[in-house]
Structures are given as C-alpha cells and as structure tokens.
Amino acid sequence: GNSVTQMEGPVTLSEEAFLTINCTYTATGYPSLFWYVQYPGEGLQLLLKATKADDKGSNKGFEATYRKETTSFHLEKGSVQVSDSAVYFCALSENSGYALNFGKGTSLLVTP
Amino acid sequence: DTAVSQTPKYLVTQMGNDKSIKCEQNLGHDTMYWYKQDSKKFLKIMFSYNNKELIINETVPNRFSPKSPDKAHLNLHINSLELGDSAVYFCASSQGSTGSQETQYFGPGTRLLVL
C-alpha cells in the first residue's frame, strides 16, 4: 500500500537558518505529492505540490522536487523566519478516491 | 468568506452520547472528505464523498456515519461516543474532476473531547 515517511521532529532552528525536512514515499503507481502546513490552532493549507517526476513545487520561499528515482520529496527553505513555525505534513494522493495519505508531520520551531 | 467551515469548533461531551459535526464548503467542489487527527498530530482519512456518493470508507467504526444532503455539505454523526474518539476532525473539499493532482482545502477543525 501507499505510505509516507517524514523525519521526526521537533526541529528547532534559528531565524535565517537553512531548513530541510525529509520525506520519502512508497506508492504502487504515480502519485501526486504535496506539502501541507498547519499553523497553531488552524486547519491545514497547501504549501506546494508536484504532480509528476522531476517537477519542482515552490511557494513562499519553500521548494521541493519530486524525485522518482529516490522516491523522495524533501522540503527546503534557504532562510527560515519565526513565522514559519508550524507543523509540516508531506502527503501523497493516487487515483483511488483521491484521499491524501499523510506522513506523521514535522514540527518546526524557529527562534529569533 | 470562509471556503470550508465546520461547526462546532469545540465539542466537549460525555461517553455514550451522540453528536454531529457539520461541514459546508462554498467553493463549488464536488468532493468532500473527513479526516481524523489524533493527539500525536497524525492525520488519517475517514470518508470521502463525490457528488453526494460515498467513495472512501476507511476502517472506521460504524458508530461514525457521514451524511451528505447536497454537494456543499458533508456532516459527520457519531453514536455512542467513546474516549478514543477524542481528536480533531477536519473536513476538506476538492474540485473532484482532476483526480489525484487536486489541492484539498481544509476547514479549521473540530476539537472533540469525550469525558
């Protein structure tokens, strides 16, 4: 079956540090890949997505590249801000019902 | 305008009670979902509806019954609540016409606490 594995948190960084959150997946077909972000007390919102191999999703300085050969979709940002503190979820979706299959989430805390 | 709304935002109730959570989307989407987020933040799909028809029904106890009166609404009714039902329940919607590529839009969540 499909599954998503992402690095355990919490991750604590100083402002302007480089961020990488690792995500790998297993899937039977050709899934679409997503990063969603959950700010404290809120619902999830899409951060970025990629729908085929070698696509790069990007938004708000974050980016991730769909790597089929390594089944990965690692999230990166060159310089994090305090406002980036949130929980980040890697997810995949295949055609069966379109539901998102989430990783366990990685909590990020950015300190001034 | 809120795209996906849920009511109530907080729900505290006793074991054994029956409760409902309502979800409405004003995006004109055809597909709606319910997800459960446990205390460790893990999110899991419960149900998915497309055009009022059930598409996904994961291994959820039959005490949980989704109801979709129209495309814009997907309510979740829970009978005989148990302690383990305490979680945050998220409703979401997506366009429903372009498959797995679609962005899902989430509601703010309903925090259910069963005492």
Image: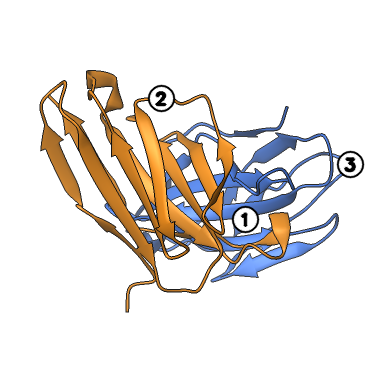
Which quadrant of the rendered structure holds the C terminus of chain B?
top left
Q: Nearer the viewer, residue B111 or A106?
A: B111
Q: How many marks?
A: 3
Say which amino acid is labelled 2: Asn
Residue B81 in the figure: left or right of residue A33 = left
Disc 2 crowd, CA 10 A, few/some/many (<14, 14-19, 20+): few
Which residue is disc 3 drawn over? A69
Give the structural element (helix, strand or loop) at label 3.
loop
Q: Position of residue B30 (x, y in %)?
A: 56, 64
Q: Residue at x 27, y 52 (%)?
A: A41
How are the residues colored? by chain
**Residue A76 versus residue A107 in the image, above or below:** below
Mark 3, mark 1: which one is toward the viewer?
A: 3
The chain coloured blue is A
Mark 2 near mark 1, Cβ–Cβ under 8 Å?
no
Say which amino acid is labelled 3: Glu
The chain coloured orange is B
Give the structural element (helix, strand or loop) at label 1.
strand
Q: Is residue B40 visible?
A: no
Q: Give the number of the disc on residue A1.
A: none
Spot the residue most to the front: B69
Q: Nearer the viewer, residue B21 or A105?
A: B21
Say which amino acid is labelled 1: Glu
Q: Give the number of the disc on residue B62.
A: 2
Q: Residue at x 34, y 43 (%)?
A: B76
